[in-house]
Image (cartoon, rainbow, N blue to C red):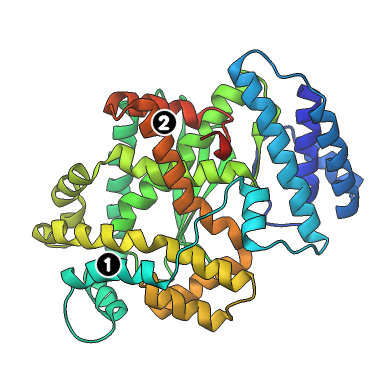
Amino acid sequence: MNDAAEQYVRLVLALGEHDSDYVDAYYGPAEWRDEVRHNRWSVPEIHALGLTLRERLSHFDRPAEELESLRLDYLRRQTDALIARAEMLEGRRFSFDEESKVLYDAVAPTNDENYFRSLNAAIEQELPGDGPLTDRVEAYRRQFAIPRERLDAVFGAAIDVCRAKTAEHFALPEGETFTVEYVNGKSWSGYNWYQGGFRSLIQVNTDLPIFIDRAIDLACHEGYPGHHVYNALLEKRLVRDRGWVEFSVYALFSAQSLIAEGSANYGIDVAFPAGERVEMEKETLFPLAGFDAGRAEQYYRIYELVSRTGYAGNEAARRYLDGDFTADQAVEWLTAYALMEPARARQRVKFFDQYRSYVINYNLGKDLVRDYVERESGGDRDKRWKVFEQLLSSPRLPSGL
C-alpha cells in the first residue's frame, strides 16, 4: 500500500500544477515535487493515472487492523476525489450535490425559505424593531467589532486560552507553533497554511469588520484544537510514526476537508461549551476589546441564533452553482436568510466562485463530527476529548461517521 500511497501523493502534486487551490499543504520529499514539475503531466494524463491507481487499490485485500483498513478506504476515496477534480478541470460539470458527494463524501440537506424564515423569527424576538432584520443584526453586531488597534491583543489572548484548554487534554507535538498575519483581498475570513514540522501560518482577513465572536472562533478553528492541531497530529502520528506518506499532502478538494473543517468548527464547542465560553469571554476578551462584559450573554444568545442560519449559505451556493441564481440573487438570498450585510454576502459569493461546494464542509461537517463524537463518547466530557483526538489523528472518512 505504501507504493500506491506514494503514487497518490505524486498525482496530487501533479494536479496542483494545474489548479493553484488544490494542494493546501505539502511537506513530503522535495524531490517528489521536483520530479512532478519535471514530468509536466497534462490533466488528461493525471486523470488516466488516477484511474489506474483506483483500479490497483480496488484489488487490495482489506487489512485486519482497523487503522490500516481505514487507511485503505481513505486512499480509495481520496483517489476518487482526485479523478473527479481532474474531470472538472477538463470541463465536466457536476451538479452541486453530485460534486459534494464525489469530492467530500457527503451531501448537504436542502432547506426552503420557510425553514429560514422560522429561524429568523426567533432572532426577531431578540432584536425587535423597524426595518429589515439583516440591518438590525448588522447594526447590533457592529457594536462589537474589534477595534483594529486592539485586534492583535484580543487574538493573542484567544489563542493563549485555546492552546491552554487543548493542552489539558492533548499531548501536542514538541515544538509546535504558528504565526498570525493580517491580510486583505481574500474570499475567506481566515486560513491556516500548514508548513510541516508542526508549524502553521494563520492569516486573518481584515477586509470587513471582525466581531468579538471571531476571536475564539478563529483561534480554535485555525489553531487549537482546529486545523493546526489536526495537521500536527497527522504529521506526528501517521506520517512520522507510521510512515504514511499520503498524509504529507493535503488535497483541498477531497473528503479530508470535511473532516478538517467539521472538526475545526466542532472543536470550538469541545473546548468551550456555551456557558463556559461566555464566562471566559466576559473575564478576558470583552474587556480587552473595550466592550461591556455585561452584554456578553445577550450577544451570544443572538450569535447562536444567527449561527443556525448557516445552511442558508449552502442553499445559496447550490442554487447559484446549479444556475438557478445569478450572483445578485445569491447575494439577496444570503442577505435575507443568512442575515449577511451585502458586502459580506458578496464576499461569500466570491468564495462560491473559487471553492464551489466546499461550503458544506463547515456546517454539515460540524454536524457530522459532532454527532459522531457525541455518540462515541456518550456525552461524557473527558471521553469527548479522547474521541475527538482519535478522530483528528486517524484517516476516518465522512461516510464513516
Give left or right: position of 323 versus 285. Answer: right
Q: What residue appears at the point 41 percent right and 26 percent down from the top-left corner?
A: 387
Report the amino acid beneath label 2.
Answer: Phe
385 versus 262 height, above or below: above
Residue 147: numbered disc? 1
Give left or right: position of 164 versus 390. Answer: left
Residue 232: numbered disc? none
Q: What residue appears at the point 59 percent right and 81 percent down from the top-left corner?
A: 326
Give left or right: position of 210 versus 49. Answer: left
Return the x and y of residue 225 as percentages of the image width and height.
Answer: 40, 37
Q: How many marks?
A: 2
Q: Quadrant of residue 248?
A: top right
Residue 365 visible in rendering: yes
Which of 115/88 is in front?
115
Residue 388: numbered disc? 2
Q: Secondary structure at mark 1?
A: loop
Q: Quadrant of residue 382?
A: top left
Lower position in the chain sequence, tag 1 or tag 2: 1
Q: What residue appears at the point 74 percent right and 57 percent down from the top-left corner?
A: 19
Return the x and y of residue 380 as percentages of the image width and height.
Answer: 28, 26
Q: Residues within 10 Å of mark 2 (few under 14, many from 20)?
A: many
Kindly report which numbered mark, 1 or 2, lies closer to the viewer in this rendering.
2
Report the amino acid beneath label 1.
Answer: Pro
Return the x and y of residue 215 as percentages of the image width and height.
Answer: 32, 54
